[in-house]
Image: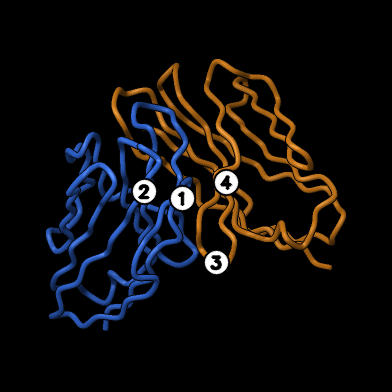
Amino acid sequence: AQKVTQAQTEISVVEKEDVTLDCVYETRDTTYYLFWYKQPPSGELVFLIRRNSFDEQNEISGRYSWNFQKSTSSFNFTITASQVVDSAVYFCALSEEGGGADGLTFGKGTHLIIQP
Amino acid sequence: DTEVTQTPKHLVMGMTNKKSLKCEQHMGHRAMYWYKQKAKKPPELMFVYSYEKLSINESVPSRFSPECPNSSLLNLHLHALQPEDSALYLCASNQGGTGNEQFFGPGTRLTVL
């Protein structure tokens, strides 16, 4: 069975600090997909990134970067020079290769608080 | 048009009421999803429609009844709900297949009295 663990329930940092959100996953499939979503207080889930299991390249997008390591089953997310607007709940999610559309298995989320 | 819309934004209903939640997308996506999210919890998958056919029903009680009238629309019919069904109901869509990112609507915040 698939599982996503986000051990950090809440992180609070001061603006401009760097912060890393951890995500560890479990799956029996060799083909799977990992995602990060942001959920601001308004409630809408905003897609940030997708990674498939064959692509271990790290990704950088502006202040955001992602470190995917199959050896440790981790897909961590770093925000550099954090800003107050980054305050939100961040979810890591997993879907497995199964044919057809399937749903996402989410971690419990990390509530990130950026203090001015 | 690159968004998923949901109506209403908020809904308050009694346990004997019948109501419907609506979701719409015009991105040509072939799969649509309903998730339920309780406060301070992650979204939980309820239903998946793929090419307008119900493909996944995650053991959801029959008081929730999904409907996909066409490839752009997804409804969730509600009847005889319980107070514990109060939650944020999120609709999502994607291209279908496996591994494609899902795009979420803003959700309907449901309160059952």
Q: Is residue A68 left or right of residue A98?
A: right
> Which residue is found at the position 19% from the left and 72% from the top?
B19
Whether discs 4 and 2 lie on one chain: the answer is no
Q: Quadrant of residue B29?
A: top left
Q: Residue at x 84, y 68 (%)?
A: A116
* Residue A42, numbered label: 3
Label 2–label 1 contact, CB within 8 A: yes
Q: Residues within 10 Å of mark 3 (few under 14, many from 20)?
A: few
Quadrant including the N terminus of chain A: top left
Query: In terms of image quadrants, where is residue B75?
Result: bottom left
- Horizontal arrangement in the rendering, residue A58 relative to residue B16 (left or right): right
Same-subunit check for callouts 2 and 1: yes
Residue at image position (58%, 27%) is: A73
Residue that mark 2 sits on: B25
- Which residue position holds label 1? B3
In the rendered image, residues at marks 4 and 3 fall on the same chain: yes
Q: CA distance from mark 2 to mark 3?
A: 20 Å
Residue type, numbered disc 2:
Gln
Query: Which label lies toward us, 1 or 4?
Result: 1
Same chain for mark 1 and mark 3? The answer is: no
* Helix, strand or loop for disc 1: loop
Whether pointer 4 and pointer 3 mark residues with C-beta atoms closer than 8 Å, the reply is no
Q: Which chain is blue?
A: B
Q: Disc 1 and disc 3: Cα gap in Å?
A: 16 Å
Question: Circle 4 sits on which residue?
Answer: A6
Q: Chain of mark 3?
A: A
Residue at figure coordinates x 48%, y 28% from the top left: A33
User: Between residues B110 and A29, which one lies in front from this camera angle?
Assistant: B110
